[in-house]
Image (cartoon, rainbow, N blue to C red):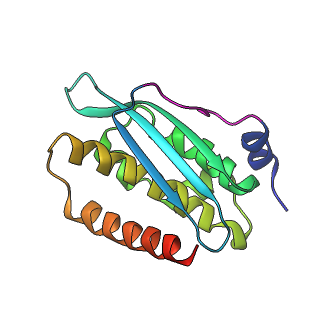
């Protein structure tokens, strides 16, 4: 069902754990499967003085695919600018893992959303401009979170 790369990221995930004093925190969950992800980021600057994700850690409570997508997603965005990180979508996450069963692709979307929420949290806490697309995505995620809380 899962390829070797997915199993490898599940058994020995990269960037797993908590960051002390993160600059941004994203939390997302899936009402249907019950997976919950936290992404915590540290923001630094690159040689062009652009804000980058200098460090990222995750905690995921979920299935093999949820943990593997969290792991590979952190690898994909670490060192990237905030805007570059927002452009890395679920397709790139799945491709970087060498594929996922169709029924598990939603896990890659969760990882993508968790990173977006961490960036949103950082930008809003620091009163920085939030791109319109990120604002819309945050509203969708927030609406889903409220629905989930009311159901449980």
- Main SS class of the magenta portion in the image: loop
In this view of the protein, can residue 91 be seen by the observer?
Answer: no
Choose between 43 and 81: the one closer to the eye: 43
Residue 121, image x, y percentages: 31, 47
Residue at 53% x, 54% y: name it. Answer: 111
* Rendered position, 60 above or below 92: above
Q: Give the range drawn in magenta.
A: 12-20
Residue at 71% x, 73% y: name it. Answer: 103
Does the magenta run of residues contain 55? no
Residue 60, image x, y percentages: 63, 47
Which picture quadrant has residue 81? top left
Choose between 104 and 25: the one closer to the eye: 25
Residue 115, image x, y percentages: 43, 49
Which picture quadrant has residue 135? bottom left
Quarter of the N terminus within the rendering: bottom right
Q: Is residue 143 left or right of residue 44?
A: right
* Rendered position, 11 above or below 94: above
Q: Residue furthest top?
A: 47
Q: Residue furthest right?
A: 1
Q: Is residue 45 left or right of residue 72?
A: left
Choose between 149 and 80: the one closer to the eye: 149
Residue at 37% x, 37% y: name it. Answer: 80
Which picture quadrant has residue 101? bottom right
């Amino acid at each position: 069902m899962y390829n070797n790369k997915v199993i490898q990221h599940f058994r020995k995930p990269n960037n797993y754990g908590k960051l002390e004093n993160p600059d941004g925190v994203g939390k997302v969950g899936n009402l249907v499967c019950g997976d919950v992800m936290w992404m915590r980021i540290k923001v630094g600057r690159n040689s062009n003085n652009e804000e980058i994700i200098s460090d990222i850690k995750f905690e995921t409570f979920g299935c093999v695919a949820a943990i593997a997508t969290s792991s590979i997603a952190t690898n994909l965005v670490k060192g990237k600018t905030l805007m570059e990180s927002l452009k890395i979508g679920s397709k790139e996450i799945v491709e970087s893992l060498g594929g996922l069963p169709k029924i598990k692709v939603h896990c890659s979307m969760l990882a993508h959303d968790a990173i977006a929420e961490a960036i949103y949290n950082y930008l809003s806490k620091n009163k920085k401009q939030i791109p319109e697309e990120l604002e819309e995505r945050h509203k969708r995620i927030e609406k889903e979170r409220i629905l989930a809380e009311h159901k449980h």
